[in-house]
Each structure stands twice: as structure tokens, then as C-alpha cells.
Image (spheres, rainbow, N blue to C red):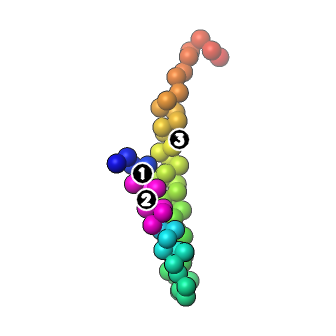
Amino acid sequence: MSKQNQIQERVAYLQEQLDSLGHFLPETYQYLMDEMDTQHRHLMELKVQDFYATQHHDPSVA
């Protein structure tokens, strides 16, 4: 399983937890949102790295 898939599964799990909260403490909600932000940031970092890894730089084009 790729790192991106693992992070996407974490994000899905966190979203399920947020969706299932009926009555919750603000601290719980804030913790889950902070963790969601962290996972989204990691996922975006991997996507950007993958994008640049697939780009071919042609030095003759400037």
C-alpha cells in the first residue's frame, strides 16, 4: 500500500469520526480537525513530490 493510500485512509477515518460526532466536546472536535489538517498536508506534500518527480527538465528550454 502506498504512502498516499495510507494517508487517504487516515483522512477517511478522521472524517468518519467527525461525521459520527453527535454531541462532542470542543476539544475533541479541535483535535480531530487538527489531525485532519496534518494528514491533508502530508498528502499534498506527497502529491507535489510525485508531480515533480514525473517532470522532465529540458535544459535547452529556458
Crowding at mark 2 (Cα within 10 Å: few <14, some 14-19, many 20+): few
Q: Which residue ends up furthest to the right in the rendered image?
A: 62
Amino acid marked by disc 3: Val
Question: Principal SS element in the magenta part?
Answer: helix
Residue on which the image places disc 2: 9
Q: Is residue 3 left or right of residue 28?
A: left
Q: What residue is at 52 percent from the left and 33 percent from the top? A: 52
> What label sits on residue 5 in the rendered view?
1
Vertical relation: 32 (above or below) 54: below
> Label 3's element?
helix
Amino acid marked by disc 2: Glu
Q: What residue is at 34 percent from the left and 48 percent from the top? A: 1
Vertical relation: 39 (above or below) 22: above
- The C terminus, quarter of image: top right
Q: Quadrant of residue 7?
A: bottom left
Between tags 3 and 2, which lies in front?
Answer: 2
Crowding at mark 3 (Cα within 10 Å: few <14, some 14-19, many 20+): few
